[in-house]
Amino acid sequence: MKATLRAPASRASAVRPVASLKAAAQRVASVAGVSVASLALTLAAHADATVKLGADSGALEFVPKTLTIKSGETVNFVNNAGFPHNIVFDEDAIPSGVNADAISRDDYLNAPGETYSVKLTAAGEYGYYCEPHQGAGMVGKIIVQ
């Protein structure tokens, strides 16, 4: 006796996606403990350079401590350790004519993964610090070429 195999009536009925990409992303994000919204914001954010607020070891420092970028590039500061940190540019340690208040982030980044981005255009050196941890040596420098 011969078996006969029949193809489905239409390809559309034979091949259906199990779940949408959005649903798959939601499942992955929920397993990872992050919301789809924060995942999307993280993926959408563009930075030319990243500075960690707190070392992987837990030390109170910016990593890297000194960073060199080109004019017009964006620096993304990421809270790495979960301590409250901020980014305050020292008005006496930035190029003349740059408004330190406009580029600083006085509010604290409290949770790991929280970010602050700043685009720097004026060439020169930018000294900055974390206000609550400056005494512990949490200071950094960005050199804009």
Image (tube, grey):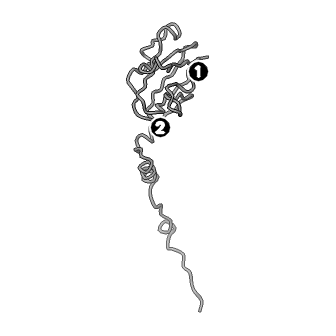
Which residue is drawn at the image coordinates 58% and 19% (left, top)? Answer: 71
Tag count: 2
Q: Nearer the viewer, residue 128 or 137?
A: 137
Residue appearing at x 57%, y 86% in the figure: 3
| Residue occupying the point 46% across, 52% down | 21
Instruction: Judge the density around disc 1: few (<14), some (14-19), many (≥20) Cα neighbours within 10 Å.
Output: some
The one of 101 and 110 positioned closer to us in this rendering:
110
Task: Choose top left, top right, bottom left or bottom right for residue 133.
Answer: top left
Give the SS element for disc 2: helix
Classify residue 95 as left or right of residue 31.
Answer: right
69 w.r.t. 5: above or below? above
Q: Name the amino acid, label 2.
A: Thr
**Mark 2 or mark 1, which has the lower sequence index?**
2
* Front one among 133 and 96: 133
Q: Label 2 to label 1, Cα distance in Å?
A: 24 Å
Numbered badge on residue 77: none
- What is the secondary structure assignment of the residue under circle 1? strand
Residue 88 screen position, x and y as percent: 45, 18
The percent position of residue 101, horizontal first and vertical second, equals 42, 14
Relative to 84, 123 lies left or right: right
Q: With respect to residue 60, does 123 lie above or below?
A: above
Q: Measured along the vertical axis of the image, is residue 67 above or below residue 3?
A: above
State the residue position of label 1.
Answer: 66
Q: Identify the image quadrant of the N terminus.
A: bottom right
Q: Amino acid at mark 1?
A: Thr
Q: Which mark is residue 42?
A: 2
